[in-house]
Image (spheres, coloured by chain):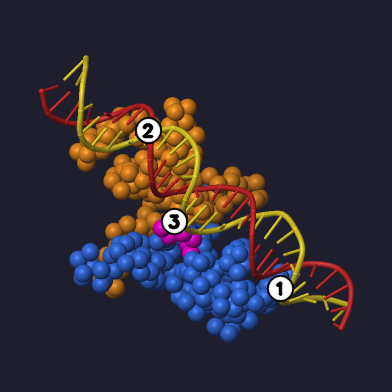
Chain colours: A orange, B blue, C red, D yellow
Amino acid sequence: MRQTMQHIKHLLGEQGHSWTRARSAVLTVLTTVPSPLRAEEIHRTVRSSGINLSSVYRALRLFETLNIVRRVELGGAARYELADDYRHHHHHLVCDACGRIDDVATCPVEAADLTRQIRKRTGFAVRSHVLELFGLCRSCRRDGR
Amino acid sequence: MRQTMQHIKHLLGEQGHSWTRARSAVLTVLTTVPSPLRAEEIHRTVRSSGINLSSVYRALRLFETLNIVRRVELGGAARYELADDYRHHHHHLVCDACGRIDDVATCPVEAADLTRQIRKRTGFAVRSHVLELFGLCRSCRRDGR
DNA sequence: TTGATTTTGCAAATCATTTGCAATATATGC
DNA sequence: GCATATATTGCAAATGATTTGCAAAATCAA
């Protein structure tokens, strides 16, 4: 992950943004935890370093516009995770019972070449997509929930 | 759509819920407009009948739990549309430039039989999914946005 | 129709997120 | 390394979406 951090630090510099404690801390959390986190969850782990919730939001917004993180909207709250450039493209399995979120690497949009199909048929140029799969994870299924 | 309304009215009755002016009005909007609407947009068209925004939210929440409508989260705000049982299963093409939302009938999740594949590989039982495709619609593309 | 039960309107509360502004941290040129 | 210009932060208050408490009104079942 050092690589990623260094790379992003450099990228911020190039774009005229400072490398600050807040941004570094938020990014550390995002490179450490694999599942998409809410701003408040990120804040919980960085507030001990005296970083404010507003700064977390501001950092996330900046990262989003720079395509460093992507925002996923799940169940009313926005969640953030490293963008595809820094983590392989993937989707999520969200358990309706326990809320656990896992990744799926298989992307049916790519597999079906849907982007090209849509472009040909409708003229719409797909640039990105969000796919979230909901259901019951193995252990909740076992528990009969 | 009369059919749909009748059917849902019946369904509410069976589950011990009343058929009220507010619920009927919200449903009428949803069966009339094809794209997913925000609560406030629905309210705008039913407030002339003296229906309160809270009631719109309450109706939507009830419909959602009864699987009559589904909630789609796009760009921070929740939007609602008739559930798959009342409209063919579909996904959305959301234009990043003008905000226009169109349907796509092709479902790559079904095409790739992803649900079974995931179940076999991970034990996770997929029950539903959300797929939203973002990009530029034909006319925004033409306008060079 | 009537009484029991649900639902509604309204206003206030809540939750996630954003913003204004003065104080502080980071970056740049010497 | 230091001073200074610029960008960023913390804090508190503002905002926008959604939810809730409660008394009044609508719906339901007999």
- Neighbour class for label 2 at 10 Å: few (<14), some, many (≥20)? many
Marked residue nearer the N-terminal end (3 or 1): 1
Name the residue that disc number 2 marks: A22
Cα–Cα span, label 2 and label 1: 52 Å
Lateral position of residue A67 relative to residue A143, left or right: left
- The amino acid type, in three-letter code, at marker 1 is Ser
x then y, percent, for residue A38: 47, 43
Q: Would you say the residues marked 3 and 1 are in contact, meaning their CB atoms lie under 8 Å apart?
A: no
Q: Chain of mark 2?
A: A
User: Residue at horizontal 50%, vertical 34%?
Assistant: A44
Name the residue that disc number 1 marks: B18
Q: Secondary structure at mark 1?
A: loop
Q: Secondary structure at mark 2?
A: helix
Name the residue that disc number 3 marks: B76
- The amino acid type, in three-letter code, at marker 2 is Ala
Magenta segment includes B78: yes
Lateral position of residue A65 relative to residue B92, left or right: left
x then y, percent, for residue B106: 39, 69
What stretch of residues is rendered in magenta? B72-79
- The amino acid type, in three-letter code, at marker 3 is Gly
Q: Are marks 2 and 1 on the same chain?
A: no
Q: Quadrant of residue D10?
A: top left
Please name whichever residue, A52 or B115, is drawn nearer the observer in this view of the structure.
A52
Examine the rendering and report whether any part of residue A130 can be seen. yes
Residue B115, compared with residue A38, is above or below; it is: below
x then y, percent, for residue A27: 36, 35
- Neighbour class for label 3 at 10 Å: few (<14), some, many (≥20)? few
- Neighbour class for label 1 at 10 Å: few (<14), some, many (≥20)? few
Magenta segment includes A16: no
Nearest to the eye among marks 2 and 1: give it: 2
